[in-house]
Image (cartoon, coloured by chain):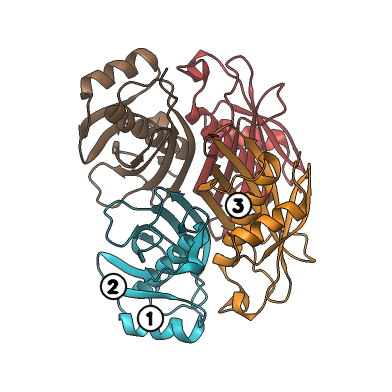
Chain colours: A red, B brown, C orange, D cyan
Amino acid sequence: MPILSVEQIQSFLLQEFPQNTVTIDSLSEQGAWLRQKIDQSHLRPGGTVSGPVLMTVADIAMYVALLAEIGIVPLAVTTNLTINFLRKPSAEADILAHCHLLKVGKTLAIGEVSLYSEGQTDAVAHVVCTYAIPPKK
Amino acid sequence: MPILSVEQIQSFLLQEFPQNTVTIDSLSEQGAWLRQKIDQSHLRPGGTVSGPVLMTVADIAMYVALLAEIGIVPLAVTTNLTINFLRKPSAEADILAHCHLLKVGKTLAIGEVSLYSEGQTDAVAHVVCTYAIPPKK
Amino acid sequence: MPILSVEQIQSFLLQEFPQNTVTIDSLSEQGAWLRQKIDQSHLRPGGTVSGPVLMTVADIAMYVALLAEIGIVPLAVTTNLTINFLRKPSAEADILAHCHLLKVGKTLAIGEVSLYSEGQTDAVAHVVCTYAIPPKK
Amino acid sequence: MPILSVEQIQSFLLQEFPQNTVTIDSLSEQGAWLRQKIDQSHLRPGGTVSGPVLMTVADIAMYVALLAEIGIVPLAVTTNLTINFLRKPSAEADILAHCHLLKVGKTLAIGEVSLYSEGQTDAVAHVVCTYAIPPKK
């Protein structure tokens, strides 16, 4: 259940990660939807979105879904991320990411992220990601 | 056993991935060493190198180690990547990546990448990565 | 869409994997449900189902879901499996596994498996698994 | 640096995991070596050692390497395990596992395990594994 709004997290990201280009479409009990606009700089040979772009979007999607649930904890950090690339993303569509938390514990949170080329039903990549949550002071 | 030189692969990367900022330090039978210069744009809250930067370097390290072994195959693509983040990278040192191929098959290649902050002995992250090799025409 | 029945696959498993103790509850377009009865031999210190038991069930769940989709291909083999352990399984409930295929390609298939202690809503473990499909002769 | 002997850990395993069939060959600063004797019950179609057997050996190898380093902590549990299957194991050789710890932190330990068919140089599988270490009382 999100306790922060899209605007609160977007504003945190803007301040702390000025280089971030991923935006939040929505937050709900069913998970977070994020978006990466795609341009020439995100592509690789074969006219497709590069793997690191997808990993970046997935990592931020998990971070946003987690902060939405536990509040702003800037120092939550990724400890493990596994990505499977499933299909060739379109070079001409935005990447949409849906993150769904599998478990939020006291020190570890685990979530899964499905990545799509906007307008397509089948995911282009699937990610499972663990974040370590620092102890509260 | 590398069949291509550092210069041959660097020149391929420059042409096909103009946005790439990772460079090759060396190639040998013991694996490939790559380098990402670190500046403010690579950092995240807590004064450390962001996870996506490390994933990007690891993915390119595997790509370079593979191409060095099998020749220029631009359409080799990552199918699976697992990263474990081990220690906080220094904000003031370059990231060095060492990739060692575990298996090069006809259709799949698997390698492992250790990532370091230059000057430190212990790895900051560890990656296992699978690439699919397209069939020769 | 399954092209084989529970009975067909169960009979194949019985013949080829006589040591297997996992059974199939159902097969449908929404995926495969499997079951491992739990007894003392599956437990570890702390009164919980051991990790290897969960990994075994997940691997077989993926194998069954895949064979249901592509037919009996005994030599399909796991190439990659990532498991995240989420919660302590009950020592007194069967383990149920649900496998959902993310992609079935010509040479690789990827699926995700959620594992439950029967009667509980939250998964005890989550698995992503890749199988290599041998070429048809 | 191991603080426990092979005999100390073997005796703990015998008592707490009576169903375990993996034995310890050696423990040193360079890591732990373990062995699984292979018989008909470990095989699958194609005359090879089944995946779950390899995962079981890897998980125990990591457990042993960790306990050797931090002392007997029965409730240390696997949180994440990623295995890549590299080559077909021999049906007629023991499986040897070498575990090397990448990081031992206060709450998480990460290690890598290479699995071999005895007598062969190239690994049959590669595992990265995370254990959660319960807080001391």
On the rendered image, what quadrant is the N terminus of chain B found in? top left
Q: Classify residue A128 as left or right of residue B40.
A: right
Q: Position of residue B127 (x, y in %)?
A: 40, 44
Location of mark 1 (residue): D9
Q: Which mark is residue A15?
A: none
| Viewer-proximal residue among B58 and B65 | B65
Give the amino acid at mark 2: Leu
Location of mark 2 (residue): D27
The residues bearing labels 1 and 3 have C-alpha atoms spaced at a distance of 29 Å
Relative to C81, say whether B97 is above or below: above
Q: The residue marked by circle 3 belongs to what chain?
A: C
Q: Is residue A105 visible?
A: no
The residues bearing labels 1 and 2 have C-alpha atoms spaced at a distance of 10 Å
Location of mark 3 (residue): C127
Give the amino acid at mark 1: Ile
Q: Classify residue C35 as left or right of residue D53.
A: right
Relative to C56, say whether B112 is above or below: above
Instruction: Give me the residue at 38% from left, 78% from top.
Output: D71
Mark 2 secondary-structure assignment: strand
| Viewer-proximal residue among A125 and B34 | A125
Give the amino acid at mark 3: Val
The residues bearing labels 3 and 2 have C-alpha atoms spaced at a distance of 31 Å
Point out the tag, 1 or 2, that comes first from the N-terminus: 1
Q: Quadrant of residue C40?
A: bottom right
Q: Position of residue D35 (x, y in %)?
A: 36, 70
For the residues bearing labels 1 and 2, Cβ distance under 8 angstroms: yes
Mark 3 secondary-structure assignment: strand
Q: Is residue C111 visible?
A: yes
Report the number of discs. Answer: 3
Q: The residue marked by circle 2 belongs to what chain?
A: D
Instruction: Give me the residue at 32% from left, 49% from top.
Output: B123
Crowding at label 3, few (<14), some or many (≥20) Cα neighbours within 10 Å? many
